[in-house]
Amino acid sequence: TATTPTYLSGLAYLNVASNRLSGQLPAAPQLAAANFVSVHSNRLSGSLPAGLLHNLTEMRYLMLQRNALSGGVPSEIGRLVKLSGLAMYENRLDLPLPEELGDAILLNDLRLQSNRINGTIPESIGNLVRLRYLDLYDNQMEGDIPPGIANLTNLKELYVQNEHLTPVRQR
């Protein structure tokens, strides 16, 4: 597991995308001031470590897409009350989405397509009233799409076509 140098602690913007980085993400990055982190399109693998998001309270955009990350979206995601965009698509995520996702109430762009996410779409998704883009396409989710989806009146694009989900039109 890598560590983040302490001299990066004041960094607001970190972009190390498309650098062929490999290995796992550090457990507790020293990026408390960061509001934009992009490590997409690398070769990162393994589960997201516990504590990864603990101190990232200023985070607005977190881009982890196009890696080989496994596990799930950390429940700590709800602590990121300033988060506007989360992209973790095209990984190997295989755990259900946490209910705490609905605590990230400023989220307006959520891209989790092309993973192996199972379980159901959490009821708390209806709390994300600022959401404009929601992509859960190509996962292993099942069950009904929660009724709270009707609360997402700002939604412009919705992708939830999964063979195991009960489509909205079949209710």
Image (cartoon, helix red, strand yellow):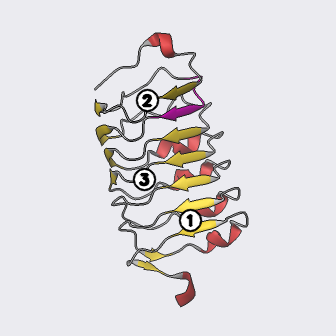
Please state if 114 lies on the left or on the right of 61 as rendered.
left
Residue 61 in the image, given as x and y percentages of width and height: 57, 39
Real-space Cα separation, disc 1 to disc 3, in angstroms: 21 Å
Disc 2 crowd rating (10 Å Cα; few below 14, some 14-19, many 20+) is few
In the image, which residues are magenta?
A: 32-38
Residue that numbered label 3 is attached to: 89
**In the image, residue 127 above or below residue 70:** below
Label of residue 167 in the image: none
- Quick check: 71 above or below 167? above
Q: Given the image, on which type of amino acid does mark 2 rest?
A: Val
Given the image, on which type of amino acid does mark 1 rest? Glu
Identify the residue at image location x=63%, y=49%: 107
The reply to whether dot 1 and dot 2 touch (C-beta < 8 Å) is: no
For marks 2 and 3, give the CA distance: 17 Å
* Front position in the image: 168 or 38: 38
**Please, is residue 158 above or below residue 38 in the view?**
below
Q: 124 or 107, which is in the foreground?
A: 107
Q: Secondary structure at mark 2?
A: loop
Query: Could you classify mark 1 by the number of other residues whose Cα lies within 10 Å: few (under 14), some (14-19), or many (20 or more)?
Result: some
| Mark 1 or mark 3: whose residue is earlier in sequence | 3
x, y percent for residue 164: 38, 77
Which residue in the structure is indicated by mark 1? 123
Magenta span includes 10: no
> Which one is closest to the eye, mark 1 or mark 3?
3
Q: Which residue is mark 2?
A: 16
Q: Does residue 124 appear anywhere in the picture?
A: no
Q: Is residue 14 left or right of residue 141?
A: right
Q: Position of residue 32 (x, y in %)?
A: 56, 23
Q: Are marks 2 and 3 in contact (CB under 8 Å)?
A: no
Q: Does 113 sit left or right of 23 as displayed?
A: right
